[in-house]
Image (cartoon, rainbow, N blue to C red):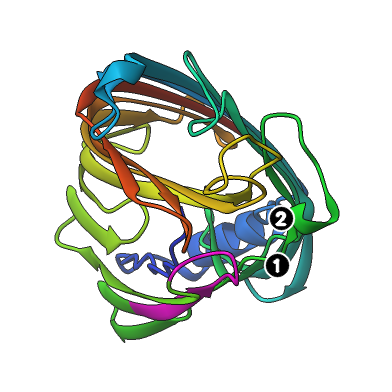
Amino acid sequence: MRKGLLVCCLSLVSATAFAGESTLSQAAASIAASPTPDPTWTFQATTSYTGSARIMKAADFGSQANVEYELQAYKNVKLYQNYFLQLGFDLDRINFSRSNNLFPYALTSLAGEIKFSYWDGDDFYPVIQLEPGLYYTRAYITKNSFDIPIRLTPGLKVSDNLYLIGGCSIDVYTNPIVYPVAGLNWKISDKWNLRAVFPRPRLSYIPNSKWEFYVQGDLNGSSYRNGPTDDHRTNNAVLEYYYYRAGVGFDYNPVKGVDIEAVVGYNLRQEYDYIRAGPIYDVKPAPYAWVNFKWTLF
């Protein structure tokens, strides 16, 4: 889940030709009179559809498709310079077209969001992220459904165009509990950018300030506490569900604060893993489509 998580601190450099003192004074006064406002709220809605595919090792189960919905809202509290504390919630649900005792009809997470993030003027990049909440399958919520995934992704500036990112994600309901995260953000030129960072690495072509076109990977998912079933392997067990997909997409910013993204591609692999309780079930490849709308208030 969620989640796509990346630290970027690109700086913008401008050059000004020599002019008279009056011209410089007027420019400085204009800048001082209209400072860039700080973001106050961020709202985000995402949906995706993955086509039908058979589950390996469970061929008689039939083909399965899924639809995912996610809603997020954050209050952005400025701490210092471009660093913010983001407080909000994240509701994520995946509905499957077919289910049984082994494969649930829905996976749901309802989590609070606590983020320490860097704002680059257009996007937030979390440095520290905590997601305390309920992670459950079907409609079963128990005391064991509570979890607190933690993600640490600090960045190191190598040059004005290159940042290295290192860190880890920590979750007692995953295997392994601590998973390393590393990557880089490289501004190759004014038109090309490489964000080689989990969970959504991408290579972008940016023709202007409104449009970005890219090829992207998407490696995401989460862990959920299963409810009671008639199968001893899955009864109240922890289920890890992950997907690995790739596609092409665009990011459109018609006005500052409004962001529309869409991706089409192929879900290369979906994976069901009941940790320490049974085999791993892989799902055959299938096409997918993903749409995201984000609105930032200033």
- Residue range in magenta is 165-175
Name the residue nearer the viewer: 116 or 59: 59
Q: How many marks?
A: 2
Q: Position of residue 200 (x, y in %)?
A: 34, 50
Q: Place residue 210 in its image quadrant.
A: top left
Q: Position of residue 35 (x, y in %)?
A: 68, 56
Q: Residue type at mark 2: give it.
A: Asp
Residue at 43% x, 66% y is 20
Q: Position of residue 29 (x, y in %)?
A: 65, 60
Left or right of residue 161, residue 49 in this image: right
Give the residue at x 65% y 36%.
229
Q: Which residue is mark 2?
A: 38
What amino acid does circle 1 point to? Phe
Q: Looking at the image, is 205 positioned above or below residue 62? A: below
Q: Between 33 and 173, which is closer to the camera in this rendering?
A: 173
Q: Residue at x 47, y 24 (%)?
A: 254
* Structural crowding at the residue carrying mark 1, measured as other residues with C-alpha within 10 Å and reported as few (<14), some (14–19) or many (≥20): many
- For the point 37% across and 55% down, the residue is 199
Q: Is residue 210 above or below residue 194?
A: above
State the CA–CA distance, disc 1 to disc 2.
10 Å
Q: Are marks 1 and 2 in contact (CB under 8 Å)?
A: yes
* First in sequence: mark 1 vs mark 2: 2
Q: Nearer the viewer, mark 1 or mark 2?
A: 1
Q: Is residue 111 left or right of residue 53?
A: right
* Quadrant holding the C terminus: top right
Relative vertical location of residue 26 with respect to residue 242 in this rendering, above or below: below
Residue 119 is inside the magenta segment: no
Q: Return the residue nearer the eye: 130 or 237.
A: 237
Residue 133 visible in the shown view: no
Considering the numbered disc 1 on the image, is that residue within a helix, a strand or a loop? strand
Compared across the picture, whether 201 is left or right of 138 comes to: left
Q: On the image, numbered disc 1 is attached to which residue? A: 84
